[in-house]
Image (tube, rainbow, N blue to C red):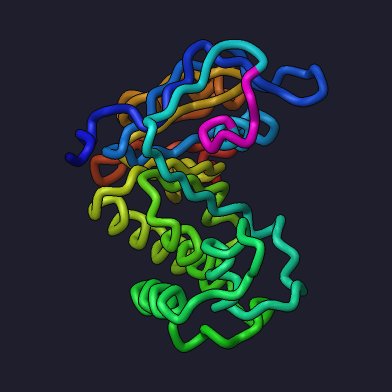
Protein backbone atom coordinates (compact mmCIF):
# COMPACT_ATOMS: atom_id res chain seq x y z
CA UNK A 1 0.00 0.00 0.00
CA UNK A 2 1.34 3.45 -0.93
CA UNK A 3 2.30 5.73 1.91
CA UNK A 4 0.10 8.84 2.31
CA UNK A 5 1.72 11.90 0.74
CA UNK A 6 1.10 13.94 3.88
CA UNK A 7 3.25 11.65 6.04
CA UNK A 8 6.64 13.34 6.66
CA UNK A 9 9.53 12.05 4.58
CA UNK A 10 12.14 13.66 6.83
CA UNK A 11 11.74 15.11 10.32
CA UNK A 12 14.36 17.34 11.94
CA UNK A 13 13.61 17.57 15.64
CA UNK A 14 15.51 20.30 17.53
CA UNK A 15 18.59 19.63 15.37
CA UNK A 16 21.87 21.51 15.70
CA UNK A 17 24.73 20.81 13.29
CA UNK A 18 28.04 22.14 12.06
CA UNK A 19 31.63 21.32 11.20
CA UNK A 20 34.70 20.86 13.40
CA UNK A 21 32.90 21.93 16.56
CA UNK A 22 31.55 25.12 14.95
CA UNK A 23 27.74 25.11 14.91
CA UNK A 24 26.16 26.38 11.71
CA UNK A 25 22.51 25.60 12.47
CA UNK A 26 20.84 25.76 15.88
CA UNK A 27 17.69 24.00 17.10
CA UNK A 28 16.09 23.38 13.70
CA UNK A 29 12.60 21.92 13.60
CA UNK A 30 11.38 21.01 10.14
CA UNK A 31 9.08 18.43 8.54
CA UNK A 32 9.43 17.71 4.81
CA UNK A 33 6.57 15.99 2.99
CA UNK A 34 6.10 14.62 -0.51
CA UNK A 35 3.58 17.39 -1.16
CA UNK A 36 6.19 20.10 -0.48
CA UNK A 37 7.80 22.35 -3.10
CA UNK A 38 10.04 24.41 -0.86
CA UNK A 39 12.64 27.12 -1.36
CA UNK A 40 15.26 27.62 1.35
CA UNK A 41 16.45 31.24 1.32
CA UNK A 42 19.11 33.12 3.23
CA UNK A 43 22.47 34.88 2.81
CA UNK A 44 25.78 33.13 2.14
CA UNK A 45 26.95 31.21 5.19
CA UNK A 46 23.46 31.08 6.68
CA UNK A 47 23.32 27.26 6.68
CA UNK A 48 21.27 26.52 3.55
CA UNK A 49 23.61 23.82 2.22
CA UNK A 50 24.04 22.44 5.74
CA UNK A 51 20.27 22.09 5.97
CA UNK A 52 20.24 20.15 2.69
CA UNK A 53 22.99 17.85 3.99
CA UNK A 54 20.97 17.18 7.12
CA UNK A 55 17.91 16.31 5.05
CA UNK A 56 20.04 14.13 2.77
CA UNK A 57 21.65 12.34 5.70
CA UNK A 58 25.28 13.06 4.79
CA UNK A 59 25.69 15.25 7.87
CA UNK A 60 24.80 13.98 11.34
CA UNK A 61 23.26 16.27 13.97
CA UNK A 62 25.38 17.13 17.00
CA UNK A 63 22.14 17.55 18.94
CA UNK A 64 18.52 16.65 18.29
CA UNK A 65 17.29 13.91 15.98
CA UNK A 66 16.76 13.24 12.26
CA UNK A 67 14.05 10.71 11.38
CA UNK A 68 13.01 9.45 7.95
CA UNK A 69 10.25 7.36 6.46
CA UNK A 70 11.57 3.78 6.26
CA UNK A 71 11.26 3.39 2.47
CA UNK A 72 12.55 6.86 1.66
CA UNK A 73 14.58 7.45 -1.51
CA UNK A 74 16.34 10.83 -1.78
CA UNK A 75 18.24 12.28 -4.75
CA UNK A 76 20.57 15.29 -4.66
CA UNK A 77 21.58 17.78 -7.35
CA UNK A 78 24.78 19.70 -6.41
CA UNK A 79 25.77 23.24 -7.28
CA UNK A 80 27.16 23.25 -10.82
CA UNK A 81 30.17 25.24 -9.59
CA UNK A 82 31.32 22.29 -7.47
CA UNK A 83 31.53 19.85 -10.41
CA UNK A 84 34.78 18.94 -12.21
CA UNK A 85 33.60 19.43 -15.79
CA UNK A 86 36.87 18.03 -17.19
CA UNK A 87 36.18 14.59 -15.72
CA UNK A 88 36.25 12.23 -18.74
CA UNK A 89 32.63 11.07 -18.96
CA UNK A 90 29.77 11.48 -21.38
CA UNK A 91 26.28 12.62 -20.42
CA UNK A 92 25.00 9.03 -20.51
CA UNK A 93 27.88 7.77 -18.35
CA UNK A 94 27.31 10.54 -15.79
CA UNK A 95 23.60 9.80 -15.56
CA UNK A 96 24.19 6.05 -15.20
CA UNK A 97 26.42 6.67 -12.17
CA UNK A 98 23.16 6.95 -10.24
CA UNK A 99 22.77 3.17 -10.68
CA UNK A 100 26.39 1.97 -10.76
CA UNK A 101 28.34 4.03 -8.22
CA UNK A 102 27.94 1.56 -5.33
CA UNK A 103 28.52 -1.62 -7.35
CA UNK A 104 31.71 -3.64 -7.59
CA UNK A 105 31.42 -3.70 -11.38
CA UNK A 106 30.59 -0.26 -12.82
CA UNK A 107 29.13 -1.45 -16.13
CA UNK A 108 25.48 -0.70 -16.74
CA UNK A 109 22.99 -3.18 -18.13
CA UNK A 110 21.09 -2.75 -21.38
CA UNK A 111 17.87 -2.13 -19.45
CA UNK A 112 19.55 0.56 -17.32
CA UNK A 113 20.74 2.33 -20.46
CA UNK A 114 17.19 2.22 -21.84
CA UNK A 115 15.89 3.74 -18.59
CA UNK A 116 18.55 6.46 -18.66
CA UNK A 117 17.77 7.30 -22.29
CA UNK A 118 14.06 7.55 -21.45
CA UNK A 119 14.83 10.04 -18.67
CA UNK A 120 17.10 12.05 -20.98
CA UNK A 121 14.30 12.12 -23.56
CA UNK A 122 11.86 13.34 -20.92
CA UNK A 123 14.22 16.22 -20.13
CA UNK A 124 14.86 17.01 -23.80
CA UNK A 125 18.57 16.14 -23.97
CA UNK A 126 18.60 12.58 -25.38
CA UNK A 127 20.53 13.86 -28.40
CA UNK A 128 23.38 14.82 -26.03
CA UNK A 129 23.78 11.35 -24.52
CA UNK A 130 27.24 10.70 -26.03
CA UNK A 131 28.55 14.24 -25.65
CA UNK A 132 31.29 15.02 -23.11
CA UNK A 133 29.90 16.86 -20.09
CA UNK A 134 32.23 19.86 -20.55
CA UNK A 135 30.55 20.61 -23.90
CA UNK A 136 27.17 21.35 -22.31
CA UNK A 137 25.59 24.73 -21.65
CA UNK A 138 24.55 25.66 -18.11
CA UNK A 139 20.94 24.64 -18.72
CA UNK A 140 22.00 21.33 -20.28
CA UNK A 141 24.30 20.63 -17.31
CA UNK A 142 21.42 21.17 -14.92
CA UNK A 143 19.15 18.87 -16.94
CA UNK A 144 21.84 16.18 -16.94
CA UNK A 145 22.05 16.21 -13.14
CA UNK A 146 18.27 16.20 -12.92
CA UNK A 147 18.27 13.10 -15.14
CA UNK A 148 20.84 11.45 -12.89
CA UNK A 149 18.69 12.26 -9.86
CA UNK A 150 15.49 10.99 -11.50
CA UNK A 151 17.10 7.65 -12.32
CA UNK A 152 17.06 6.99 -8.56
CA UNK A 153 13.24 7.30 -8.65
CA UNK A 154 13.26 9.51 -5.54
CA UNK A 155 10.41 10.51 -3.27
CA UNK A 156 12.37 13.66 -2.37
CA UNK A 157 14.62 15.75 -4.61
CA UNK A 158 17.13 18.16 -3.04
CA UNK A 159 18.83 20.84 -5.16
CA UNK A 160 21.58 23.24 -4.10
CA UNK A 161 21.28 26.59 -5.94
CA UNK A 162 19.85 25.01 -9.14
CA UNK A 163 19.59 28.33 -11.01
CA UNK A 164 22.84 29.94 -9.85
CA UNK A 165 24.85 31.34 -12.75
CA UNK A 166 22.25 30.67 -15.45
CA UNK A 167 20.32 33.17 -17.55
CA UNK A 168 16.69 34.11 -17.05
CA UNK A 169 15.37 31.76 -19.74
CA UNK A 170 17.29 28.80 -18.32
CA UNK A 171 16.06 29.65 -14.84
CA UNK A 172 12.49 29.62 -16.14
CA UNK A 173 13.05 26.26 -17.87
CA UNK A 174 14.53 24.68 -14.72
CA UNK A 175 11.65 25.93 -12.57
CA UNK A 176 9.12 24.66 -15.10
CA UNK A 177 10.77 21.22 -15.05
CA UNK A 178 10.77 21.16 -11.25
CA UNK A 179 7.13 22.21 -11.21
CA UNK A 180 6.27 19.30 -13.51
CA UNK A 181 8.18 16.86 -11.28
CA UNK A 182 6.36 18.16 -8.23
CA UNK A 183 3.03 17.80 -10.02
CA UNK A 184 3.96 14.17 -10.67
CA UNK A 185 4.18 13.61 -6.90
CA UNK A 186 7.80 14.35 -6.00
CA UNK A 187 8.76 16.38 -2.93
CA UNK A 188 11.28 19.12 -3.79
CA UNK A 189 13.50 21.28 -1.59
CA UNK A 190 15.93 23.74 -3.17
CA UNK A 191 18.22 26.47 -1.90
CA UNK A 192 18.46 29.90 -3.49
CA UNK A 193 19.69 33.46 -2.99
CA UNK A 194 17.19 34.74 -5.51
CA UNK A 195 14.06 35.95 -3.72
CA UNK A 196 12.43 37.75 -6.63
CA UNK A 197 13.51 35.52 -9.50
CA UNK A 198 12.53 32.21 -7.98
CA UNK A 199 11.63 31.93 -4.30
CA UNK A 200 8.67 34.29 -4.54
CA UNK A 201 7.05 31.88 -7.01
CA UNK A 202 7.38 28.76 -4.85
CA UNK A 203 4.43 27.78 -2.65
CA UNK A 204 6.53 27.30 0.50
CA UNK A 205 9.60 29.12 1.79
CA UNK A 206 11.98 28.51 4.67
CA UNK A 207 14.10 31.51 5.74
CA UNK A 208 17.40 30.50 7.34
CA UNK A 209 20.17 32.38 9.10
CA UNK A 210 21.78 30.06 11.64
CA UNK A 211 18.30 28.88 12.57
CA UNK A 212 14.89 28.84 10.91
CA UNK A 213 13.70 32.42 11.05
CA UNK A 214 10.30 31.68 9.49
CA UNK A 215 8.54 29.29 7.15
CA UNK A 216 5.30 29.46 5.21
CA UNK A 217 3.82 30.85 2.02
CA UNK A 218 5.63 33.71 0.23
CA UNK A 219 2.92 36.16 1.30
CA UNK A 220 3.47 35.25 4.96
CA UNK A 221 7.27 35.03 4.83
CA UNK A 222 8.33 37.80 2.45
CA UNK A 223 7.67 40.61 4.90
CA UNK A 224 10.14 43.28 6.12
CA UNK A 225 10.63 41.94 9.66
CA UNK A 226 11.42 38.37 8.55
CA UNK A 227 13.71 39.58 5.75
CA UNK A 228 15.64 41.88 8.07
CA UNK A 229 16.28 39.04 10.53
CA UNK A 230 17.24 36.72 7.67
CA UNK A 231 19.46 39.01 5.60
CA UNK A 232 20.61 41.52 8.21
CA UNK A 233 19.40 44.51 6.20
CA UNK A 234 16.22 46.50 5.90
CA UNK A 235 14.39 45.45 2.74
CA UNK A 236 11.19 46.91 1.40
CA UNK A 237 8.41 44.70 0.05
CA UNK A 238 6.14 45.90 -2.73
CA UNK A 239 3.33 44.10 -4.53
CA UNK A 240 3.41 43.49 -8.27
CA UNK A 241 0.76 41.44 -10.08
CA UNK A 242 -0.35 40.01 -6.77
CA UNK A 243 3.15 38.83 -5.77
CA UNK A 244 5.52 40.29 -3.15
CA UNK A 245 8.61 41.93 -4.67
CA UNK A 246 11.67 42.74 -2.56
CA UNK A 247 13.76 45.88 -3.07
CA UNK A 248 16.82 47.13 -1.23
CA UNK A 249 15.69 50.28 0.60
CA UNK A 250 19.09 51.86 -0.02
CA UNK A 251 18.72 51.19 -3.76
CA UNK A 252 14.96 51.27 -4.43
CA UNK A 253 15.27 50.30 -8.09
CA UNK A 254 17.49 47.29 -7.39
CA UNK A 255 15.81 43.96 -6.72
CA UNK A 256 17.28 41.35 -4.40
CA UNK A 257 18.86 38.49 -6.34
Furthest residue in direction front, as rendered? 104
Which image quadrant is residue 138 in? bottom right
The rendered magenta stretch, by its main secondary structure, is classed as loop
For this rendering, which residue is in front, 235 or 54? 54
Q: Quadrant of the N terminus?
A: top left
Classify 193 as above or below 123. Answer: above
Furthest residue in direction left, as rendered? 1
Classify 147 as above or below 4. Answer: below
Classify 137 as above or below 155. Answer: below
Residue at image point 66% right, 62% down: 104
What span is colored magenta in the figure?
Answer: 54-61
Whether residue 75 appears in magenta in the rendering, the answer is no
Residue 24 seen from this side? yes
Residue at image point 56% right, 49% down: 161
Label tally: 0
Classify 250 as above or below 200. Answer: above
Classify residue 143 as left or right of residue 45.
left
Which image quadrant is residue 131 in? bottom right
Residue 132 x %, y %: 65, 83
Residue 13 x %, y %: 47, 14
Classify residue 254 as left or right of residue 246.
right
Residue at image point 34% right, 74% down: 122
Residue 125 seen from this side? no
Which image quadrant is residue 3 in? top left
Residue 9 x %, y %: 37, 32
Residue at image point 38% right, 41% down: 200
Amino acid sequence: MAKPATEPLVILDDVSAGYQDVLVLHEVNLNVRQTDFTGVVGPSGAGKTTLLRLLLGTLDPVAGARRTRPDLRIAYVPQLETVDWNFPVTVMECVLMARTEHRVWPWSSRSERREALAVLERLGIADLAERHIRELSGGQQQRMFLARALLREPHLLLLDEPTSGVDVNTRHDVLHLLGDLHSDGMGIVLTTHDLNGMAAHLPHLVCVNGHIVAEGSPRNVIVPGVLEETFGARLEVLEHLGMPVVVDSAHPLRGVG
